[in-house]
Image (spheres, rainbow, N blue to C red):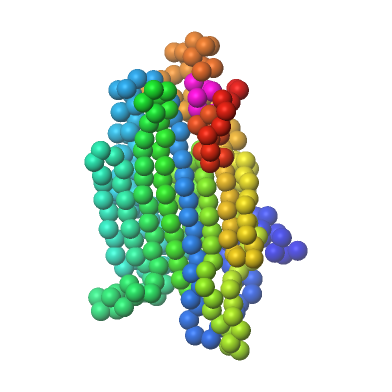
Amino acid sequence: MSVFKDILHGDVGKLMKKKKLKLLGFNNLTKTLSFNMYDICYARTEEERANYIAYIDAEYSAERLTQILKTVSDIIGASILNIAQQDYDPQGASVTMLIAEEPVKNEKQDVVMHLDKSHITVHTYPEMHPQDGICTFRADIDVSTCGKISPLKALNFLLKSFEADIVNADYRVRGFTRDVNGKKIFIDHSINSIQNYMDVELRNKYNMIDVNVYQDNIFHTKMLLKSFDLENYLFDLKVQDLNQKEIKKIRRLLKQEMYEIFNGRNLPAVKD
């Protein structure tokens, strides 16, 4: 019953510590949390579309992304070893951060830790449809850890930081560690869905579908925002500036884009 309550309330700390394992040496399980997050927008003119791309590039610059990843490192309790960041021309940005479970003491130790530790990466891809006016911003994020620290602790922070319309989330535990008797441990915490570790507020905000492979410790959750307010999807444009025919057309284009991304394939024309 207590585990069910923790799942219901998204209590990550309690879920991760339900049963303390006594291990033989270092916990070398690799835990990876990955996201594809999408923001969808309609921009009517070529100039407005260019302005949207510029806005996204400024909003999610390499420097801003670096600050987000630093917070992720703090949340999961990791030490930062190295940061590489880059803004691209004409658009997009990347940040790669090497992290470690133990505190960093000196440069010599850093070199050793690079070989067997963890990383956080983010890559952004702003793009647009040249005819329909649909603009799509995608951020790919990977949080990969080795040891006791867990990327699941940063799940809610990352989802809230990007406020995405669509999310494809993957979580996988790889490898094994051993207990003091030599028995292999392939997973060291309770989970039957990524949703277990989400705040109730987030779970209520999205329609979600799970595709999980439990025997291989692979968990996949697809998320689509429930609410659809056209005003939130227009760039440099107001609903009152549109006639009913335009509103219907734009709503259909936006939903077509969102449903296709959510389902991962091209679909017949949707009806609004």
Residue drawn 36% across and 35% down? 127
Q: Quadrant of residue 59?
A: top left
Q: In which quarter of the image is residue 186?
A: bottom right
- In the picture as drawn, the residue positioned furthest to the right comes out as 1
The answer to whether residue 253 is magenta is yes
The image position of residue 104, as x and y in percent, is: 33, 74
Q: 7 or 271, which lies in front?
A: 271
Magenta stretch, residue numbers: 250-255
Residue 128 in view, yes or no: yes
Residue drawn 39% across and 71% down? 117
- In the picture as drawn, the residue positioned furthest to the bottom comes out as 181
Prevailing SS of the magenta stretch: helix
Q: 271 or 97, which lies in front?
A: 271
Q: Against 253, is 185 above or below?
A: below
Q: 91 or 266, which lies in front?
A: 266
Q: Quadrant of the C terminus?
A: top right
The image position of residue 27, as x and y in percent, is: 50, 78
Q: In which quarter of the image is the N terminus?
A: bottom right
Q: Against 51, is 117 above or below?
A: below
The image position of residue 260, as x and y in percent, is: 53, 35
Q: 179 or 174, which lies in front?
A: 174
The answer to whether residue 192 is magenta is no
Left or right of residue 245, residue 128 in this image: left
Residue drawn 53% across and 41% down? 264
Residue 197 in view, yes or no: no
The image position of residue 208, as x and y in percent, is: 62, 44
Q: Against 86, is 259 above or below?
A: above
The mark tally for this picture is 0
Residue drawn 30% across and 28% down? 50
